[in-house]
Image: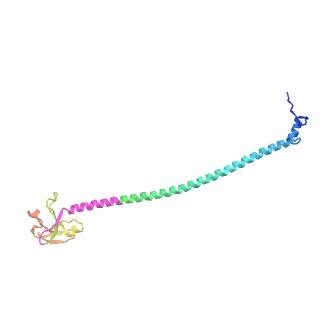
C-alpha cells in the first residue's frame, strides 16, 4: 500500500508529493539531468581520489629517493671507515712485527751483555791484552782467550796457538800476538793471567 506524501502550506493549501518536489527543487527537474549530475559528482570524487593517490605516490617516490640517498651516503661512510680500519690493522701488524723484531734484538743484546760480563781484560804476557774468563765463571768452558779488538767490535773470536808456542793468532781479524809460555796456562799448567784494569 502506497502512502501519499502531503503537507499543508502556511496559507492552508494542501500540497502533494508532486508539489513538494517542485518546491524543494525549485521547479520540476529532469531525472536524466539529476543522474548526469550524480555521475559527474562521482567522476569528480574519483578524480580527487586519483589526484590524492598520485600525490601520495609522488610523496612515496620522494621518500624512497631520500632513503636511497641516505643509504648511499651511509654506505660511502661505511666504506671509508672500513678502509681506515684496514689501514689501522695493517699499521698494527707492522707495529707488532717491529715490536717482535726489537724484542729479539733486545734479547740478543742482553745475551751478548751477559756473555761479555763473564770476561775480564787481562795481560796474557808481553803486554798483550785479551779477554779471559772471570774466576768462577767458567760454566764448564775450556779456558780460552778472546781477541780484544774483535770483542770490542762485538765478535767473540778465540785466540789460537800459532807457529811457535809463544804466538797466538785471531783467525777472525788475522792479528798475531807474541806472548810468553803462559799464554794458555790451563793447557800447559796452573797459572792465571794478570787481570788488566
> In the picture, residue 102 is in which quadrant?
bottom left
- The secondary structure that dominates the magenta segment is helix
| Residue 103 in magenta stretch | yes
In front: 163, or 120? 120
Please tell me whether residue 162 is drawn above or below residue 101 in the rendered image.
below
Residue 134 in percent (x, y) is at 15, 62
Placement of the N terminus among the 4 image quadrants: top right
Please tell me whether residue 138 is drawn above or below residue 175 in the rendered image.
above
Residue 165 in percent (x, y) is at 11, 69
- Residue visible at 45% across and 57% down in the picture: 86
Outermost residue toward the top in this view: 1
Residue 118 in percent (x, y) is at 18, 61
In front: 183, or 11? 11
Residue 27 in percent (x, y) is at 89, 42
Q: How is the image coloured?
A: rainbow
Compared across the picture, whether 94 is left or right of 121 comes to right
Outermost residue toward the front in this view: 11
> In the picture, residue 142 is in which quadrant?
bottom left
- Residue visible at 84% across and 42% down in the picture: 34
- Magenta span covers which residues? 98-126
In front: 65, or 161? 65
- Residue visible at 64% across and 53% down in the picture: 62
- Residue visible at 70% across and 48% down in the picture: 52
Please tell me whether residue 161 is drawn above or below residue 83 in the rendered image.
below
Please tell me whether residue 87 is drawn above or below residue 36 in the rendered image.
below
Amino acid at each position: 500500500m502506497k502512502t501519499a506524501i502531503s503537507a499543508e502550506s502556511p496559507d492552508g493549501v494542501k500540497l502533494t508529493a508532486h508539489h513538494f518536489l517542485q518546491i524543494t527543487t525549485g521547479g520540476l527537474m529532469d531525472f536524466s539531468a539529476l543522474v548526469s549530475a550524480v555521475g559527474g559528482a562521482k567522476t569528480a570524487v574519483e578524480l580527487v581520489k586519483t589526484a590524492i593517490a598520485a600525490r601520495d605516490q609522488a610523496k612515496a617516490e620522494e621518500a624512497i629517493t631520500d632513503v636511497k640517498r641516505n643509504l648511499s651516503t651511509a654506505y660511502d661512510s661505511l666504506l671509508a671507515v672500513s678502509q681506515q680500519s684496514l689501514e689501522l690493522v695493517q699499521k698494527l701488524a707492522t707495529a707488532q712485527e717491529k715490536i717482535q723484531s726489537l724484542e729479539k734484538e733486545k734479547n740478543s743484546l742482553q745475551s751478548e751483555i751477559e756473555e761479555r760480563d763473564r770476561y775480564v781484560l787481562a795481560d796474557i804476557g808481553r803486554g798483550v791484552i785479551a779477554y779471559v774468563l772471570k774466576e768462577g765463571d767458567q760454566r764448564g768452558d775450556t779456558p780460552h782467550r778472546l781477541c780484544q779488538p774483535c770483542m770490542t767490535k762485538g765478535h767473540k773470536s778465540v785466540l789460537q796457538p800459532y807457529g811457535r808456542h809463544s804466538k797466538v793468532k785471531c783467525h777472525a781479524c788475522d792479528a798475531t800476538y807474541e806472548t810468553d809460555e803462559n799464554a794458555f796456562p790451563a793447557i800447559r799448567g796452573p797459572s792465571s793471567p794478570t787481570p788488566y784494569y
